[in-house]
Each structure stands twice: as structure tokens, then as C-alpha cells.
Amino acid sequence: MSHDSKHKRRSFSDEFKRDAVNLIVNQGYSFRAAADAVGVGVGSLRLWHRQFAPQPEPAGDDASLAELKAENQRLRRELRQAEMEREILKKATAYFAKESR
């Protein structure tokens, strides 16, 4: 029996994914605890979180210093992620352009 036939890829409904993300967003679970609770990998749960978690509201004019610092930290993290993804896409584009010649 081949390795591929032993492990069938599982698929989950959007409702299941939203419920799993809800454990993190509304119930205060860590990614690891939520993943263990629903029987999925942390990587899958992080992907679902990016897809289904509500976007945080921007800090308003009356935001506290702590709220502004938290938003700044979140935005810096998102910027680093976007920059990393852009670099990967640039490298992939260059690779495929080179391959098509």
C-alpha cells in the first residue's frame, strides 16, 4: 500500500472552520489549544483564522496609548507578512519567466 493511499486528505466545511476560529476569537483559546480541541493542525487553523476572523477595527481618535501601541504592533506584523509574500511572488515570477524562455 502506498503512502498516499494511507492518508486521505480531510476537508472541512466553512461552518466547521468558523467554529474553530471562534474558539480563538471569542473564547480565548490559543492556536495550539484550539487546534487540539478540534483535531486539526495549527497551520490549518492559522490559515482559517486569516480567512474567517473579523478584521480588527482601527483605533479611533480617542484611543488609549495601549490601544495605539497594539494597533501599531499588529500593523507592523501585517506589513512584514505582506512584504515577505511580495518577495516570494517576485522570486516566483522571475523563476517562471526564466523557465518559459
Image (spheres, helix red, strand yellow):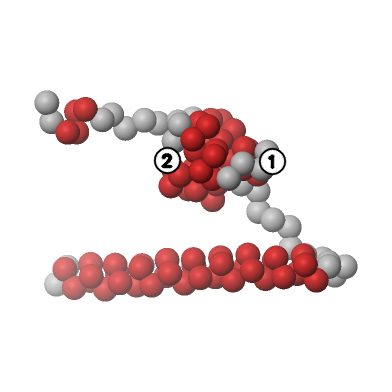
* Mark 2 neighbour density, 10 Å: few (under 14) some (14–19) many (20 or more): few
Determine if residue 51 is in view: no
> Toward which corner of the image does residue 66 lie, by quadrant?
bottom right
- Where residue 3 sits: x, y (%)? 17, 33
Residue that appears at 56% across and 65% down:
78
Report if residue 101 is visible in the image. yes
In what quadrant of the picture does the N terminus appear?
Answer: top left
For the point 45% across and 31% down, the residue is: 39
Q: Amino acid at mark 2?
A: Gly
Residue tagged by mark 1?
26
| Neighbours of disc 1 within 10 Å: few (<14), some (14-19), many (20+) | few
Q: Secondary structure at mark 1?
A: loop
Tell whether label 1 touches label 2 (CB within 8 Å): no
Judged left or right of residue 97, residue 19 is right
User: Which numbered marker is on residue 8?
Assistant: none
Mark 2 sits on what residue?
41
Residue 1 horizontal side relative to residue 47, left or right = left
Quadrant, the C terminus: bottom left
Badge 2 or badge 1: first in the primary sequence: 1
Q: Is residue 37 left or right of residue 100?
A: right
